[in-house]
Image: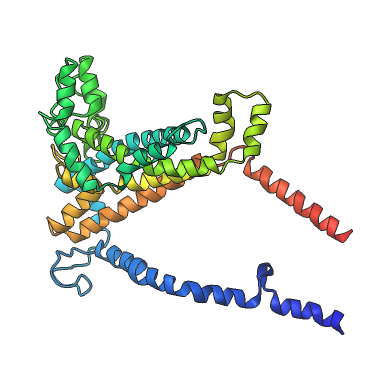
């Protein structure tokens, strides 16, 4: 009797994956409040903002009632940013170019510097670890507005940075009023002051010479500021990952006679690949959403060389009262972040075993398990 009823009771109690039948309902019950909050305050507003990006809403009245203040224009706000000649496309493309160079310099430098600092404070022979960890992390918890104001004074024409450079015999640049790109300055140093013929080709309304100008002198200040204020946070992430490395792995590497560089390259870095993915992903998201520093340190000046899509979206919405275009810029940046994150995940994927080989190994293991179960 019991032999026949026990499996039946097991089927009633155990659900899919070996869990009890009521666990799924209990899980949904406990997560329902948070899902409701996310739906009301996140997903629904995102859908509403997307609808606004399909209208010409000027801020008067409701964008969902239509009329003269909020005509439905479809994808016109998107296409005008890429295909329509005019100041709107010019500013948007310039902001994309500025932000690209900002990401290009900030993400690798902050990742490498934070990993280097994590290696330092994780050294068991270092004295005063608590002090150094606090000192490296302190800029990350300081107000970005306050630090931006401090940097304005430091990099002013008569500021401390130019004063130090003058002691070294260097005439410091006008940091916040020089619109020249970094690569244009380097090209001018070798006698290339104007665009070559091939560099005059137009891409989305901008010449290749402008696209590859590099970050402006003013943007370089923002790059230094962001690297200094974000490195501490990412250092803690790397530090947590380093402390999670199994001691047995390090001991095995030492017994194999590996040098410190070999252990770092072939043991530590591969183990920390998930941490690198997390840090670079957060870096990409943060750099494409940079706003506070741009707002405080010039609002896009000089000559829109520090203009970013996030600030341009704000400017289009709350200054030009073109909320549809502002929302469209935000969703384009969102799509860029998703695409870059997916590409980064593809680059950091595990290349040791090919997918087909993984599937073959998994199928062989499954068949062996089934054969053993039959025996």
* Residue at the spot 62% in from the left edge and 38% down from the top edge: 247
Where's residue 12, x and y in %? 71, 80
Q: Seen in the image, is 106 located left or right of residue 12?
A: left
Relative to 224, 153 lies left or right? left
Q: Where does the C terminus fall, quadrant-wise?
A: bottom right
Label count reads 0
Q: In this view, does 206 lie above or below 89?
A: above
Residue 268 percent coordinates (x, y): 56, 35
Q: Position of residue 73 (x, y in %)?
A: 22, 63
Residue at the image position 17 percent from the left and 58 percent from the top: 317
Q: In which quarter of the image is the N terminus?
A: bottom right
| Picture colour scheme | rainbow
Above/below status of 230 relative to 168: below
Q: Quadrant of residue 323?
A: bottom left
Q: Residue at the far bottom: name it.
A: 1
Q: Residue at x 39, y 36 (%)?
A: 132
**Residue that sits furthest to the left in the current view:** 158
Compared with 259, 245 (above or below) is below
The answer, for residue 305, to whether it is visible in the render is no
User: Which residue, as the protein is rendered here, is positioned at the far right?
Assistant: 375
Judging depth in this view, the residue of 136 and 328 nearest the camera is: 136
Q: Where is residue 61 in the image (x, y as percent from the top left)?
A: 15, 72
Give the residue drawn at x 63%, y 44%.
Answer: 355
Q: Nearer the viewer, residue 48 or 131?
A: 131
Foreground residue, 220 or 139?
139
């Amino acid at each position: 009797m019991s032999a026949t009823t026990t499996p039946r009771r097991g089927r009633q109690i155990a659900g899919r994956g070996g869990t009890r039948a009521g666990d799924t309902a209990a899980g949904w019950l406990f997560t329902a409040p948070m899902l409701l909050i996310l739906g009301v305050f996140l997903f629904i507003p995102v859908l509403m903002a997307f609808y606004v990006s399909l209208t010409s809403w000027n801020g008067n009245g409701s964008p969902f009632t239509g009329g003269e203040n909020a005509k439905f224009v479809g994808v016109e706000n998107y296409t005008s940013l890429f295909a329509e000649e005019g100041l709107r496309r010019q500013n948007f493309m310039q902001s994309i170019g500025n932000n690209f160079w900002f990401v290009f310099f900030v993400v690798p430098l902050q990742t490498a510097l934070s990993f280097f600092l994590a290696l330092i404070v994780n050294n068991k022979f270092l004295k005063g670890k608590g002090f150094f960890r606090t000192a490296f992390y302190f800029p990350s918890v300081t107000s970005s507005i306050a630090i931006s104001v401090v940097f304005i004074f430091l990099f002013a024409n008569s500021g401390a940075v130019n004063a130090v450079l003058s002691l070294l015999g260097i005439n410091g640049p006008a940091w916040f009023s020089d619109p020249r790109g970094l690569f244009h300055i380097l090209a001018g140093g070798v006698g290339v002051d104007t665009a070559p013929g091939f560099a005059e080709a137009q891409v989305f309304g901008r010449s290749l010479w402008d696209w590859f100008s590099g970050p402006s002198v003013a943007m370089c200040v923002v790059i230094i500021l962001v690297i200094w204020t974000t490195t501490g946070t990412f250092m803690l992430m790397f530090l947590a990952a380093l402390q999670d490395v199994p001691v047995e792995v390090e001991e095995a590497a030492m017994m194999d006679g590996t040098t410190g560089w070999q252990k770092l390259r072939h043991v530590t870095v591969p183990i920390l690949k998930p941490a690198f993915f997390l840090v670079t992903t957060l870096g990409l998201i943060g750099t494409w959403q940079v706003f506070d520093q741009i707002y405080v340190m010039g609002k896009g000046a000089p000559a829109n060389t520090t203009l970013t899509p996030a600030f341009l979206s704000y400017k289009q919405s709350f200054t030009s009262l073109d909320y549809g275009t502002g929302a469209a810029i935000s969703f384009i940046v969102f799509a860029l972040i998703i695409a870059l994150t997916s590409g980064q995940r593809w680059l950091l994927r595990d290349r040791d075993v090919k997918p087909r080989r993984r599937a073959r190994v998994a199928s062989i293991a499954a068949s062996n398990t089934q054969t053993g179960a039959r025996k």
